[in-house]
Image (cartoon, rainbow, N blue to C red):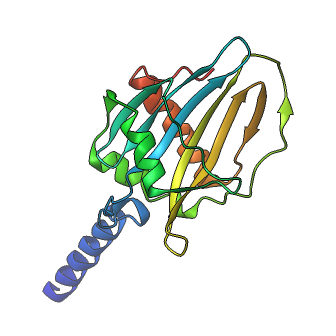
Amino acid sequence: MKIFKASSLFFILGMVLNLSSCEKDCTDPITLTNPVYFQFEAKNYAWGLFHSGWFIDKNGKFDYFNLPASWNEPDSSGYISKTDLLSNLEQADTVVYSISMHELQSQARLIDDVDENKLSEIEHVAADIGISSLYCYKRDSAKGKYKRILLETRGDILQYNLDPEAMELTSWLIAVGKEGRVLDWN
């Protein structure tokens, strides 16, 4: 009888430990080495230049920029060099919010799984109201560059990345941006 109780106890203990474990969210923390992981950007050229936004850097800081003097755009394939990305980040000279390293790590780990080619059709919905976009950045070791990947665009056009990880990151960026009062995404 004591053997049965002891084996039952081990079985129950094993079940409790198994139920309390998790897969993707509880793995070892990833090392955050990219200078930037996420970006919000708003642009409008209708009545003069409007260009502002923020990056979420490797320390979880929301680095704000407004009318940067010399901005480096990614190439037509979405790639940007580390030098150019760092130059853009240097022009984001005001920290407007921050998140914990744990929160950043849990979201940054999804970036590698985002499929950049699962974009919805572009919907033209307005004119001259500008464009606001959310992006993530993925390091491409083979090219030695960073790939800026569209998560969602709103304004003159609407376009969404329909990949499940992209949709999860978009929802998170909108929520954390609203929480920090650094994003009005309606």
Q: Residue furthest top?
A: 47
In the figure, 2 relative to 130: above or below? below
Q: Residue furthest front?
A: 70
Tell me residue 158's x, y (percent). 77, 32
Front in this rendered view, residue 9 or 115? 115
Q: Is residue 96 left or right of residue 134?
A: left
Tell me residue 90's x, y (percent). 36, 38
Q: How many marks?
A: 0
Q: Is residue 22 left or right of residue 161?
A: left
Tell me residue 53's x, y (percent). 50, 28
Front in this rendered view, residue 71 or 57? 71
Residue visible at 43% across and 51% down?
107
Tell me residue 160's x, y (percent). 72, 41
- Please identify the quadrant where the C terminus is shown: top right
Residue visible at 51% across and 63% down?
145
Q: Is residue 102 left or right of residue 77?
A: left
Residue visible at 69% across and 57% down?
77
Front in this rendered view, residue 155 or 163? 155
Residue visible at 51% across and 23% down?
67
In the figure, 145 relative to 90: above or below? below
Asked which quadrant contains residue 21, the reply is bottom left
In the figure, 142 relative to 45: above or below? below
- Please identify the quadrant where the N terminus is shown: bottom left
Front in this rendered view, residue 86 or 31? 86
Q: Residue furthest bottom?
A: 3
